[in-house]
Image (cartoon, helix red, strand yellow):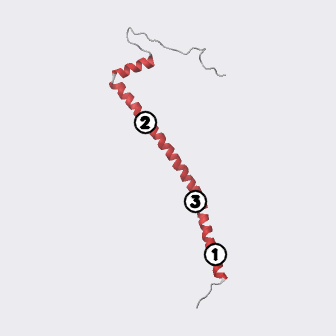
Amino acid sequence: MNVQPGIWHKLTRLAMGLILLALLLLIGVWYLPLIRTNERYRQELLRLDAQIQREEETARQLKNSIEALRTDPRAVERLARERLGYARPGETVIRFEASPTNAPSGH
């Protein structure tokens, strides 16, 4: 015997499908703010990781500079010459300064 399902059976299946779709959409809308928050946290984490890398590189350079100043007398001499303008006895130090006429104007 071949029984054809009635219209009510088809409508019931359609209604159940629509209810399931509505539930899935509700869950998606409910979790969307959480997903966006997680994405913001992920971007912030990437930014902070990049900043950590930059700071670690700076720390490494500073550590190398400190070690050079502790162990290499030429490094100390170079620093004294560059930053403090010191010279050895008998040397002449020439400094070049920008003249006021060559300075860029604020206009």
Q: How far apart are marks 3 and 1 (CA)?
A: 26 Å
| Labelled pair 1, 2 in contact (Cβ < 8 Å) | no
- Residue 95 in percent (x, y) is at 48, 13
Q: How far apart are marks 2 and 3 (CA)?
A: 39 Å
Q: How far apart are marks 1 and 2 (CA)?
A: 62 Å
Q: Which amino acid does label 2 sit on?
A: Glu
Give the residue number, with chain letter if any, for mark 2. 57
Q: What residue type is labelled 3?
A: Tyr
**Measured along the vertical axis of the image, is residue 32 above or below residue 3?**
above
- Looking at the image, which residue sits at the far top? 90
- Residue 50 in percent (x, y) is at 48, 41
| Mark carried by residue 64 | none
- Tell me the mark number nearer the camera, choosing from 3 and 1: 1
**Measured along the vertical axis of the image, is residue 88 above or below residue 106?**
above
Mark nearer the N terminus (2 vs 3) = 3
Mark nearer the N terminus (1 vs 2) = 1
Q: In which quarter of the image is the N terminus?
A: bottom right
Give the residue drawn at x 40%, y 10%.
91
Badge 3 crowding class, 10 Å Cα cut-off, few under 14, some 14 to 19, many 20 or more, is few
Give the residue drawn at x 64%, y 78%.
12
Give the residue number, with chain letter if any, for mark 3. 31
SS class of the residue under badge 1? helix
Give the residue number, with chain letter if any, for mark 1. 14
The quarter of the picture where residue 102 lies is top right
Q: What residue type is labelled 1?
A: Leu
- Residue 4 in percent (x, y) is at 62, 86
The quarter of the picture where residue 80 lies is top left
Badge 1 crowding class, 10 Å Cα cut-off, few under 14, some 14 to 19, many 20 or more, is few
SS class of the residue under badge 3? helix
Side of 101 relative to 89 (left or right): right
- Tell me the mark number nearer the camera, choosing from 1 and 2: 1
Give the residue drawn at x 59%, y 56%.
33
